Amino acid sequence: MPPLVVDLDGTIIKTDLLLEGVVDVCVRKPYVVFGMLAATMRQGRIGLKRFLVEHSRIAIDALPLVPATTDLIREAQTGGQAVLLVSGAHAEYVERFGKRLSVDEMAGTDDSTNLVGSAKLGWLRDRIDEFDYVGNSSVDIPLFAAARRAYLVNASPITISRVRRVKPDVQVLDRRALIPWRGLVRAMRPHQWAKNLLMFAPVIAAHLDVTSALVRHHLIGLAAFSAVASATYIVNDLIDLPYDRAHRSKHRRPIAAGVVSIPVALGGVIALFGIAAVLSSTLPRGFGEVLIVYVATSVAYSLVLKTKPLIDVLALAGLYTLRLFAGAVLAGVILSSWFLAFFVFLFVALALAKRVAELVGRDETEVAPLKGRGYVVRDISLLTSLGAACATASTLVYCLYITGPNVLALYARPEFLWAGFPPLLYWQGRMLLLAARGEIPDDPVAFALRDPTSYGVLVALAAVVLLAS
């Protein structure tokens, strides 16, 4: 019986080891990027693949697999058919996967041959006369054409069409969209756009008259900020690939799960930044400057700051606060010290609740920091205490503000504002309590958007403001 020859990149795994390695090097060892470029210029892809093997740290065992391929391999092995793993990936990676899948023989790119396309077919012809082939790329059309039986997995419509021209009877076991729109939208995290409604807070606090120009500017600003935020979420997911794949829930994120490829993700980032730039060009200059600061802070957070205990919490609070500044620029108002103090304490409390939620449920004996973070499980009590202190501080700032002279200029019946004290303190305390109990899955804001009690508190606060006005 002819052997079953299987490709690796995009066939056994949903991703590409070359791209995974480039991203890993750029994120974790940016100081060797010029060396990577030099290796590529000297030896092309052979040099690049060797360089990446030496300098990248890809978590091979965590890479998402293509079920259709692994099922086909098991079926072949059960039926006594030999399985060969032959790939353009570097031989070191191929060997590791070959051992994991218990294949009969394996080969990959070495220091002399980039084992793809015709080179791969030549390698096979030197050893066997007939074979079945499993792949996903049009690069291997010569192999599909020469195979006794051909199988396409994880293939795009364009690849399927091209392969069928040379192999009409190819079996398509698994398809993928050219652009996985659903996965890309999920990677953009549209549910997080609700955070950008904070841009309207300065308008509400300043009791500004609602004009068509004000509404137009804020709606355009909301769209621009949402585009930038989504772009930075995708960048964060690319940076966090190894950590997300090892996480209890984040391994389902589209990029980590292989639903969205690295090239598609990068294309999405470029498109979103382009949309934000076009929209921002119609708004006051200061808004674009706030967006630039937001992007810089977000990337710094993803690369470095998130691993620094407590600094990461301040960075998260800063990202929330920048939304307030963006709204203030659009409204043409200056944020008061009371306003900023209240929201900064509130944002720090929420960021601490997020860290608590990430730690709860883990082994209490763990002494190593959470992957990609700077905390250990025994930090929960301290983080919870700090969160409670910040929640109390934000409520105290609220109380001091409503007893000050400035409130008389904005509210006809400021004594009604005291009714906002209980729901404010209750909501923040409840979020911390639920986080400590493990009832919040990692992100308090995402939880609040699905929480009826949070909406009840919001309605109560809105009613208080209306009564006071």
Image (cartoon, rainbow, N blue to C red):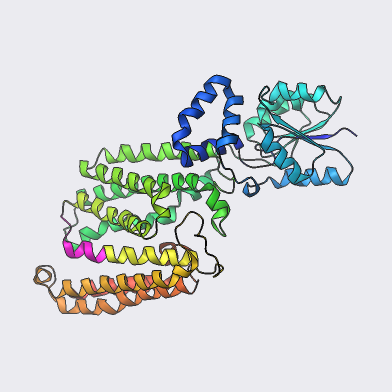
Residue beneath the point at 82% across and 22% down: 126
| Residue 340 is inside the magenta segment | yes
Q: In this orientation, which residue lies closer to the viewer: 451 or 246?
A: 246
Q: Residue at x 52, y 40 (%)?
A: 24
Tell me where residue 456 appears, x and y as whole percent.
36, 74
Q: Is residue 98 above or below residue 323?
A: above
Q: Is residue 105 or residue 452 the one in the foreground? A: 105
- Residue visible at 68% across and 45% down in the picture: 66
Q: Give the dominant element type of the magenta stretch: helix, strand or loop.
A: helix
Q: Is residue 163 left or right of residue 406?
A: right
Count of picture labels: 0
Looking at the picture, does residue 120 appear above or below residue 212?
above
Quadrant of the image containing the N terminus = top right
Q: Which residues are magenta?
A: 333-343
Instruction: Report x, y in % for residue 346.
Output: 30, 66
Q: In the rendered image, which quarter contains the C terminus? A: bottom left
Relative to 153, 20 lies left or right:
left
Residue 79 % position (x, y): 89, 44
Establish if 373 lies above or below 235.
below
Task: Using the rendered image of the protein, determine whether residue 277 is visible from the camera's viewpoint.
Answer: yes
Is 133 inside the magenta-drawn segment? Answer: no
Q: Residue furthest front?
A: 367
- Residue 107 at what x, y percent from top left? 74, 31
Nearest the camera: 254 or 457? 254
- Residue visible at 21% across and 49% down in the picture: 330
Give the image quarter of residue 430: bottom left
For the question of whether residue 466 can be seen, the reply is no
